[in-house]
Amino acid sequence: MHLLKGILRFFPIQLLILHLKTHQIFILLWALLFLIITNNLGISYGIPYLLLDPEYLGEVGFISFAILGAAFGGFVMTWNIAIYILDAYRFPFLATFNHPFALFCLNNSLLPGVFLIAYFWIMIRFQLRQEFMLGESIVYDVSGFISGLLIIIFLAAFYFTNTNKNLYRMFGVRIRPPARITRRMRMRQNFMWEQFRTKEHEFPVEYYLTARLRIRRIRGVDHYDEKMIHSVLRQNHFNALMIELATLATLIGLGFLIDYEIFNIPAGASALLFLAILVSFSGIISFWGKGWKNTLMIGLFIALDMFYRLGGFSYDNRAYGLNYDTARSEYSLSKLKEIGSPENMEEDKQLTLSILENWKKKTGQERPKMVLIAVSGGGLSAAYFSTHVLQTADSMLQGKLLKHTAMITGSSGGMFGASYLRELYLRQQLGEIPSIYNPEYAENMGKDILNSVCFTIVVNDIFFPWQEFSLGKYTYRKDRGYAMEKQLNQNTGFVLNKPLRDYRQYEQDATIPLLIFSPTIINDERKLYISAQPVSYLMRPAIRSAQPGFMDIDGVDFMRLFEHQDADNLLLTTAIRMNGTYPYILPNVTMPTSPVIKVMDAGFRDNYGLETALRFIYVFRDWIYANTSGVVLVAVRNFRLETEIEAYHRESFVDRVVNPIANLYENLGEMHDYNHAYLINYANEWLQGKLDVVYFEYIPAGKDRETSMSLHLTSREKVEIRQNISLPHIRQSIDRLQQLLQKDSP
């Protein structure tokens, strides 16, 4: 019992009890980090890789781990500062230490220490098994993390050592025990100790850990003036608050450096800095609010919400290239009917028919096969996979694939790669590059985008994006949407940095295929069809109601809706971003309409792009039947077409609450597949049996080898995707595609 009592009254144990009792939010942050590194949170989105495989300037190594270690050190020190400010008064004996804050941090290192042990163990296993790293390289990476961590700890120690004071430095009070302790003095110390324990019964402490990692009994403090002790702690608090405010000021200052790639630190480091900001704000509010902290936080949240509703510190991400200074376009049912009028639809249809006639001439065949390409979403994984697949297939077919392709569409990540490859195909046609098959192009699609986005969120968007940039005669704010497009341009050599109008004539001449994006309008879930050509004929579904007056417009033609807002000046990179607006990671784009509409990821309505392609087939079914030998629909999927049915498992209480919504979201892809199968059967009837579908599926080696839907790819994920291109099912799809393209009728 004496040993157990000693353990319970050990300072690190009492601090842990303190966290569990009064700082549940901070405990949740540590639990969040543990869930991430153990692959129990966000594995489908690659969140664990942010901490296990950080990338900086395209490399994973000593520097990237050092930056991550420094960010972790910043989080730990911010956490220690917050706890010290809030709870140092509970432990007045701290004022007797030579370095109060340093001893506090050392004794408060139980949670960080356990986390670091788990982190290094998991990270080393990850690097060995997933990244195929050698032992020497792993030691180098671990050394980088530790170096970054120690640098931050050293800087914090230097600051607090030179600014924090104890009783002696403030008042000249000697805190060293006398050389000889008499029996009477011992009795007096024990008496003072009992008084102290009576006063501080909530978190009683008898022992602490010294700087030399030895366990010592604490000194009694009841014989010191209480005001003197409080003065020491207040002085320490002031220094701690200064370092927190300086940290926040530094982060705001870094917001002005988002254009410099060298400051785009690993996304995991940005995430840790974000957690540090949360701890800082929570600590400051709790310190000043005391017992009113929860009420104060709720009040601040309500006040901030009302402030934003009234337009304070709020901004809207805009579509770069559009004119927001002129009168806004009306967005109403009557306006949609006007845009989708039979006259407009027929006019746009005739324009596209002339494009198809030019396409037919380009093939050099009387009745060629028409290829339509639909690529799926799935982050950089889909971008990397679709680029590799289309490159490989077109190469093995000796250029026939893109030559026979009339239109490309799809969702989010897949359209990153498809848009890039189409631009390269145009440059090849113009003689600017010798070939589109250079492996470097596919590798460009695998380059990180997440670092710049996350860094901008932490140092810019979380406060307010003050900076602006000009595009022609229009001005926009710099935020994470801007950072994403800038990074995509850097990764691809800025070849995509052009407005839609630059592609119009090339599409009309059939030099390159049509490219159609279809982001989702949040207000009413309609699709916003974005193309260099007006495509109002896509505004109505392929299978429409026969009842007169039935409102069946479920799409909006971008070019016609924004014809007075400079629609054809929209940047291609912005169209790509609008089509792949991952929730929270990228901002929803606000369009210049009245009332205001916002758009999000195309995958919400159709994650595979097939519905748009089938709608295109329906509109031009008569021309296709009369002028081609059929349609080959090439579906490039980042997900398996058929998945195993998961076995039922006994639900917990949390499962019963979460599953009705979570299961619906997780099975959204399957719901799209069921709808597509239904539409494909109809399309085959429209073409009287002249429709073939060729699937290119990314099939990982196992459930645990699936790539994440993230804007970052690890080395292992890239290897997995490249190896997938050589698997039999991909080769079989290429062979089938080759056979279909050889069946052109005379």
Image (cartoon, rainbow, N blue to C red):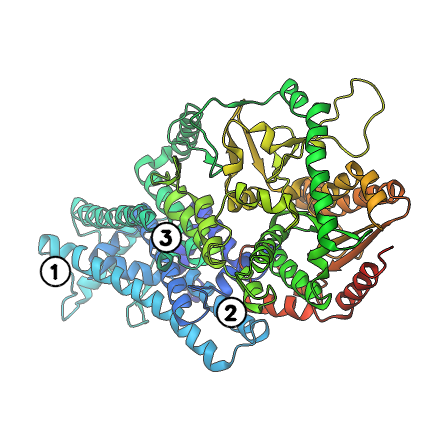
Q: Percent from the top left, x then y, of residue 216? A: 30, 67
Dot 2: what SS?
helix
User: The residue under label 2 is which amino acid type?
Assistant: Met
Q: Percent from the top left, x then y, of residue 737? A: 79, 61
Mark 3 or mark 1: whose residue is earlier in sequence: 3
Closest to the observer: 146 or 736? 736
Mark count: 3
Please give the label number shown on residue 174. 1
Mark 3 or mark 2: whose residue is earlier in sequence: 3
Badge 3 is on which residue? Answer: 79
Please name which of the two marks, 3 or 2, marks the residue nearer to the observer.
2
* Quadrant in the picture for the C terminus: bottom right
User: The residue under label 3 is which amino acid type?
Assistant: Trp
Badge 2 is on which residue? Answer: 123
Q: In this view, does 92 lie to the left or right of 259?
A: left
How far apart in space, not on screen, are marks 3 and 2 (Cα)?
23 Å
Please give the label number shown on residue 574. none
Please name which of the two marks, 3 or 1, marks the residue nearer to the observer.
3
Name above or below for residue 268 compared with residue 480: below
Name above or below for residue 451 compared with residue 132: above
